[in-house]
Amino acid sequence: MSLASLLVLADGRLPSGGHAHSGGLEAQVSAGRVRDLDAVAGFLRGKLATAGLVAAAFAAASCARPGEWASLDQGLDSRTPSPALRKASRAQGRALLRAARAMWSLPPVGRDLHQPVALGVVAHAGGLGPEEAAVAAAHGTTSGAASAAVRLLGLDPYAVHGLLARLTADCDRIAADAAARAESPVDDLPAAGAPLLDIGAELHATWEVRLFAS
Amino acid sequence: MRARSRVAAESDGRGGTRLAVLRSESPLLLRRTGPHTVHLVGGGAGPLRGDDLRLDISVAPGAALEILSVAAQLALPGQAHLPQSRLEIHATVASGGTLRWWPEPMIAAAGCNHLTVTRVDVAEGGSLLWRDDLVCGRHGEDSGDVRTDTTIRYAGSTLYRHELSVGPHAPGWSGAAVLGDGRAIGTLISAPGAFPATAGPGDFAVMPLAGPGMLATAVAPDIRAVQAALDPLGKPTATLTH
C-alpha cells in the first residue's frame, strides 16, 4: 500500500469531474432545507451514513475483487432508485476511469461504471487495498458536497472544512467495516438509502438552470 | 412474542383464487375478507422488544392476492433487556401471479427498537405492488429506532435493495439528505413498472428503477400528505366486510 497513491486518488484536484456535482446539496439548498452551517453538518452526517456507507462498501468490494465489476455495478443500480443519481454516478465513474488510465494500468472494465465501482478498480490498479478504496469513497461523498456548500451558501470555508475534520472518525470506521465485508455477496452489502437525496435529484434534474450537474 | 404466519394463494382453476394455506399466530393474525383479500387484523400491541415475527406469503400462477391491514402497527419499547423487535416478511410471486401488499403505516413510538426485513421474489411474468409507510413517532413525540431492510427481486435479479434507519441511533436521519423535517415516508414499488415517472410537487417522485420496475417515494411532515401522494397510484378498493 502506498500512502502517496491514496493521496493522489483522493485529491480533490484529481481531474475526474467531481467539481461539477454538489452531491445532492444544491437541491436541498433550493428546497430551503439547508441555509446554514448546522444544516450542512446534518446533511453531511446523513449523507455519510447512507450514500457514503454504500459507496465505501462497493469501493472496497470492487478493489478486493475487480473481476466482479459487472455484478457490483448491478448491485449499485438496485440501490440507486433515482435515474438522475444513476446518471450522475456513471458520469463520475467514466471521468474517473479516463483520468486513471493516464495514471495506472487498468484491467479491462466497462466504460460506464458507477463511481464507487470504478474507484475500487482504480484503487486496485494503483496498488491500494479495500480499506484505502473505502476511505477515499467515504471521504469523497462528503468533500464534494462540502465544497459545494461554500459556493452555494457563501459559508466560511474554514468552518466547512471543520465539519469534514469532525467526520473523519466516522469515515475511518465506515472504511474499516467496508473492508471487513469486502468479500460479502452483493445482496448482503450495505444498502442504506437517503430518500431526500433520491427525490431531490429527480426534482433537480427537471430544472432548466442549475449550478451543478447533480 | 414469537409468531409464524403464512398465507399461500393459488388459482382455483375457474379464474378465482383459493387460499391453500391461511395459518396465523398472534399477533400476526390473518383474516380472509374478500375473494382475493386478506387483512392483517393485529392481535395485540406491538411489535415490542423481544418480538420475533415472521410472515410468509406465496402466490402461485394465476392467483391474485391482496394483503391489507385494519390498523397501523405501533412499534413500542418493551423491556429494555430484550433484543430489538423483528418482523420478517418473505413473499414469492410466481409467473402469472399478482400480489398487492398495502398495509397501514408502521409507527415508530419513542424508545422502540425495531427491524423489519422484507424479501420479495417475483418470477418473470408475475406482478407486484408493494407499499410501505413509516411514521417517525406518534403525534408530538420523538421517533424511536426503526430500520427497514428491503430486497425485491424480479426475474432472478435484484431490482430494489434499500435500507432506511430512523431514530436517535441513526446518524443524520433528520438531516436534509435523509428525511429532513419529514416525519412520514411512504414507498410504493411496482414490478414490472406500472405508473408514469414524475417529480413533485413537494417531496415526491416516481422513479423508473434500473430494472423492470418503478418506485414512488414521498416524504412529508405527516402521513396524510404521504397518502395523498401515493394512494392515487393504486390504493385498493376492497373494504373490510366482516
Image (spheres, helix red, strand yellow):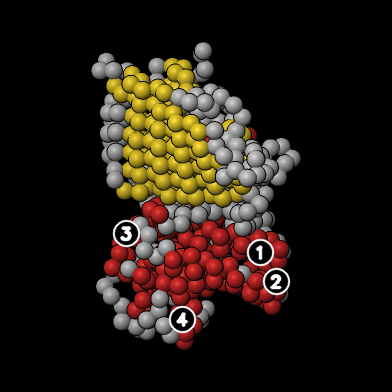
**Image-quadrant location for residue A80:** bottom left
Numbered tag placed on residue A40 in the rendering: 1
| Quarter the N terminus of chain A occupies | bottom left
| Proximity of marks 2 and 3: CB atoms separated by less than 8 Å | no
Disc 1 and disc 3 on one polypeptide chain: yes
Kind of residue at disc 1:
Val
Numbered tag placed on residue B135 in the rendering: none
Q: Earlier in the sequence, mark 1 or mark 3?
A: 1
Q: Position of residue A106 (x, y in %)?
A: 31, 78
**Numbered disc in front, either 4 or 2:** 4
> Is disc 1 surrounded by few (<14), some (14 to 19) or many (20+) residues within 10 Å?
many
* Secondary structure beneath label 3: helix
* Residue that carries the numbered disc 2 in the rendered image: A155
Disc 4 and disc 2 on one polypeptide chain: yes
Q: Give the Cα distance between marks 4 and 1.
A: 26 Å
User: Residue at image x 54%, y 33%?
Assistant: B1
| Proximity of marks 1 and 2: CB atoms separated by less than 8 Å | yes
**B131 relative to B223 in the view: left or right:** left
Q: Is residue B57 above or below residue B174?
A: above
Kind of residue at disc 3:
Ser
Whether residue B157 is visible to the viewer of this picture, yes or no, is yes
Looking at the picture, tell me which residue is in the foreground, B133 or A148: B133
* Secondary structure beneath label 2: loop
* Residue that carries the numbered disc 3 in the rendered image: A71
Disc 1 and disc 2 on one polypeptide chain: yes
